Amino acid sequence: MNTTIYPFTAIVGQDDMKLALILNIINPSLGGVLIKGEKGTAKSTAVRALADLLPPMEVFSSCRFHCDPNSMVNLCADCIDRKNSNQKADSKFAKMRVVELPISATEDRVVGTLDIEHAIKEGEKRFEPGILADANRNILYVDEINLLDDHVVDVLLDAAAMGVSTVEREGVSYSHPAKFVLVGTMNPEEGDIRPQLVDRFALSVTVKGEHAPEQRVEVIKRRLAYEQNQAEFASNYAEKQQQLAEQINKARKLLPQIELPDDLLLLTAKLSIALEVDGHRADITVIKTAMTMAAFQGRAFVNTDDIKQAARMALPHRMRRRPFEDGVLDWNKIETVFDEHQL
């Protein structure tokens, strides 16, 4: 049955969630986003709608990992051989996909498997790709990530951080590119995930149902209109979709040119110290998020507002907390640091 994806720009409210997703699409090296929220708050809808928004990407036709023909990095072994030997290879354009990882997935299903017997007998590696291979250059979506086996979550986050997945069995190893945008969603009522794993997500946002009557009415109206005629509903948002797609594409091109004043590096360090966050990942994430924010706004420089907005998404889940407590950002401390910085 032919269905039309619900338009990203038609989602009512949930601005923090939509912004966090867009920033990760502009800059996949950020490290993904964890979306916490109650049921029925458009978490899944937003993820699927974002992929549909993006233009097709060029891939090698015969590559299992969707390698980029125009790149010299993040290529699989077969594509590297093609490049080095100047072999002509056909390419095609494919839409970015949302690859879903079921909570029942085993490690072998996620990373793939090696045929050890074939390697011993024939002296060559035979690899059966897993979910991470499908996810390369796509969006990897894990619903109810808090219910996923901790070891599988570790594997996912390691691959997301390194951009490479490596399978090792009986002294035989195989590596392939696994550069994807990781999106995890969860309902806190169904259990939490370890703080060490939460810290590995670049950004974390909390979503709630709309409490303003007018907003709730708008949610209902749009959903009913979508179900009545999907094609017509999508066409009503085609112009907004195109504008957002162009803004994202321009931001991707602008990102390498973003300038970062040294005083904002110092401001970020002061923020992390004031909030007593652990490690240095928080500082780095705030800076990278702020730079991506500036690119999304069409600016070639970062300002203090970018730092402040980035801190809202990058710091709360990294703050020290007692067991079973959520990190709560003390905005008074944030404002104090900014006021002192501007003196």
Image (cartoon, rainbow, N blue to C red):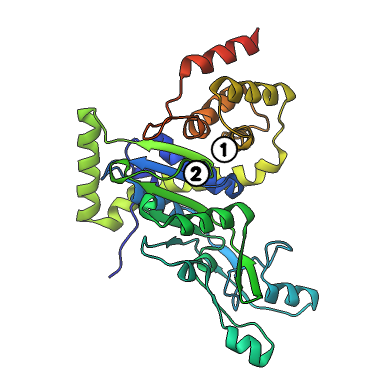
| Mark 1 and mark 2 residues within 8 Å of each other at the beta carbon | yes
Q: Residue furthest top?
A: 343
- x%, y% of residue 200? 54, 44
Q: Work out whether 193 lies above or below 150.
A: above
Q: Earlier in the sequence, mark 1 or mark 2?
A: 2
Residue linked to disc 2: 22
**Near-viewer residue (170 or 191):** 170
- In front of the other: 287 or 253: 287
Q: Which mark is residue 296?
A: 1
Give the percent coordinates (x, y) of residue 78: 68, 77
Disc 1 versus disc 2: distance between alpha carbons? 9 Å
* Left or right: where 47 falls relative to 125: left
- Element type where label 2 sits in the image: helix
Q: Nearer the viewer, mark 1 or mark 2?
A: 2
Q: Is residue 20 left or right of residue 258?
A: left
Label 1's element?
Answer: helix
Q: Residue furthest bottom?
A: 121
**Residue at image coords 34%, 35%:** 13
- In the picture, measured across the screen, residue 139 lies left or right of residue 289, that is left
Q: Which amino acid, by three-letter code, is at mark 2?
A: Ile
Judge whether 62 appears above or below 179 on screen: below
